[in-house]
Amino acid sequence: EPEVTQTPSHQVTQMGQEVILRCVPISNHLYFYWYRQILGQKVEFLVSFYNNEISEKSEIFDDQFSVERPDGSNFTLKIRSTKLEDSAMYFCASSPRTSGSTDTQYFGPGTRLTVL
Amino acid sequence: AQSVTQLDSHVSVSEGTPVLLRCNYSSSYSPSLFWYVQHPNKGLQLLLKYTSAATLVKGINGFEAEFKKSETSFHLTKPSAHMSDAAEYFCVVSKTQTGANNLFFGTGTRLTVIP
């Protein structure tokens, strides 16, 4: 069964450094998402991406964040200058965009980002 | 605005006994509701979803949930717990009913199954 994959599983970085989190969505899916979960808190929506552009983003997704689909398979989240409060589990998801019904999002296993 | 409240952060049941994980929602629209499960070191897996068809929704692994509009609830149940059910469960509401939109998660309920 196809699944969303994410790399790395754990990333440790110094405050102020740039990080890129990578995701490979399910191959025939058209919508892509990033969510994050700070330890002990809710999973929060960051951004959705469709047709090579951001379709929606939350207040969390400020200028420090960017997303890209550099090729036909990868979907990346970049944090330009990490802060301590960026430490969280980051989940990638994809959905097929089924017209006329609610899309189901399929999630990856997550990348745990630790900012020191 | 959309939100969900999971009433229990931790539920503990004995193997073979029923499971009840409670969820209440708030939505400005007719909601789509989901339950996701997360096993340790695994991604979030969809258990079931409600999209305004039948109010009793059956999912994988013997789980089901009933949408009750009058109570704004979407509780998850299973008649008989199995050891493999031990995991974190998330109740989720979608922003709108069709198309792809961001999801709003509850805080999660950790289910422990006692042998």
Image (cartoon, coloured by chain):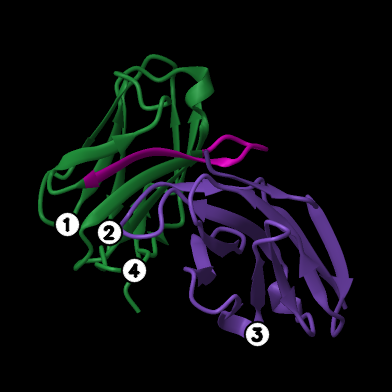
Chain colours: A green, B purple
Q: Which amino acid, mark 2?
A: Pro
Q: Secondary structure at mark 1?
A: loop
Nearest the viewer among A73 and A42 is A42
**Is residue A37 shown to the viewer in this render?**
yes
Label 3 with label 2: CB-CB less than 8 Å:
no
B6 on left or right of B57: right
**Is residue A116 shown to the viewer in this render?**
no
Q: CA distance from mark 4 to mark 3?
A: 24 Å
Residue at the spot of label 2: A25
Q: Chain of mark 1?
A: A
Q: Which amino acid, mark 3?
A: Gly
Label 4 with label 1: CB-CB less than 8 Å:
no
Residue at the spot of label 3: B62
A92 on left or right of A86: left
Q: CA distance from mark 3 to mark 2?
A: 28 Å
Q: Residue at the top extreme? A: A16
Callout in the foreground (1, 3): 3
Q: Secondary structure at mark 2?
A: loop
Task: Measuring from the top left, give residue B40's x and y in whole percent.
Answer: 61, 60
Classified by dominant secondary structure, the portion drawn in magenta counts as strand
B105 on left or right of B79: left
Q: Which amino acid, mark 4?
A: Ser
Q: CA distance from mark 4 to mark 2?
A: 20 Å
Residue at the spot of label 4: A101
